[in-house]
Image: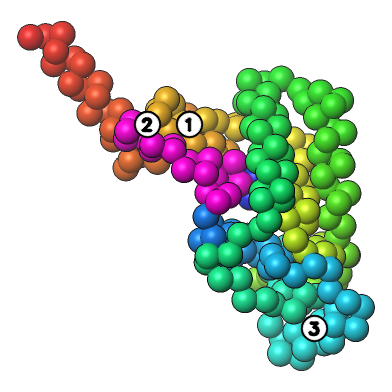
Amino acid sequence: MELLWSDFLNSEWRDWRGSGQTEDRLDSGEWYVYMTKRWDLPPLGVERASKGAESAGAEKRESASDLPSETGTGSVIEAAAWAPRELPASAERDAMRAFRQRLLRMAQTLSEGRELTEADITALNAVMSAGPVTRRLLPAEAGGRSGLRLGHVPAGGGTAQWMAEVAASFAATAAIGDGTRVHFCDNADCRWVYYDDTRSRTKRYCEDRTCGNLMKVRRFRARQKLER
Ligand SMILES: [Zn+2]
């Protein structure tokens, strides 16, 4: 299962086929477009919306009964067109890289069944406090008894808000998830991180049809070599 924080960590891409190729997707405009859509993150390139724009946006959204999802924020920030070629400033990307490095170590900590350190918790809290949320009563997704749910809507924009959302997603895993379900793909060339939500907790590869198959073929060939 992919979570916001694991998807963020996987922006450091490695070729699972073992070519040694890597790609840092924090330097790819398409990645930002993908993340905005997939996780409903606030559009980048827009700083905190002004008070007036905020309520106007919210009214527009409600009257159109266009429901914001989970972390939806389109309601408070005027959606800005983020072209696939645009990137946050290089200092902001460096800050994201530093945060990703720290998050990677924390994910390893959880996956090894260890507890986060005080310093880890302080760092997460600092990142989260830079991206405040607003509580809001929202229409429930299907199945809600009252038809309503209490949601948290990001109050700002920019990469600080993105990192806060990622940190909150990780904090939720640390607090209510099972850290030992955090897993790095067993293919050493891949190391894709995911949350293993299978009942048997035996998911060894990010995907069976890619890394799973590749490893099966390699094991088969290694066996053949031995038998020859
Ligand atoms: Zn993999």
Cβ at disc 3 under 8 Å from ligand 1: no
In the depicted structure, whether residue 227 falls above or below residue 34: above
- The residue beneath circle 3 is 57
Of the numbered discs 1 and 2, the one sitting upstream in the chain is: 2
Residue at 52%, 55% (x, y): give it: 28
In the picture, the disc for residue 20 is: 2
Dividing the picture into quadrants, the one containing residue 9 is top right
* Residue 79 image position (x, y, % from top left): 69, 77
Task: Tell me, yes or no, whether the two marked residues, 1 and 2, touch with CB atoms within 8 Å.
Answer: no
* Residue 105 image position (x, y, % from top left): 67, 27
- The residue beneath circle 1 is 191
Tell me: 10 left or right of 104: left
Residue 194 in view here: yes
Please tell me whether mark 2 sits on a helix, a strand or a loop.
loop
Measure the alpha-carbon separation of dots 2 and 3: 46 Å
Amino acid found under the numbered disc labelled 2: Gly
Q: In the depicted view, which residue is nearer to us: 160 or 74?
A: 160
Dividing the picture into quadrants, the one containing residue 37 is bottom right
Measure the alpha-carbon separation of dots 1 and 2: 12 Å
Residue at 75%, 84% (x, y): give it: 61
Of the numbered discs 2 and 3, the one sitting upstream in the chain is: 2
Range shown magenta: 7-27
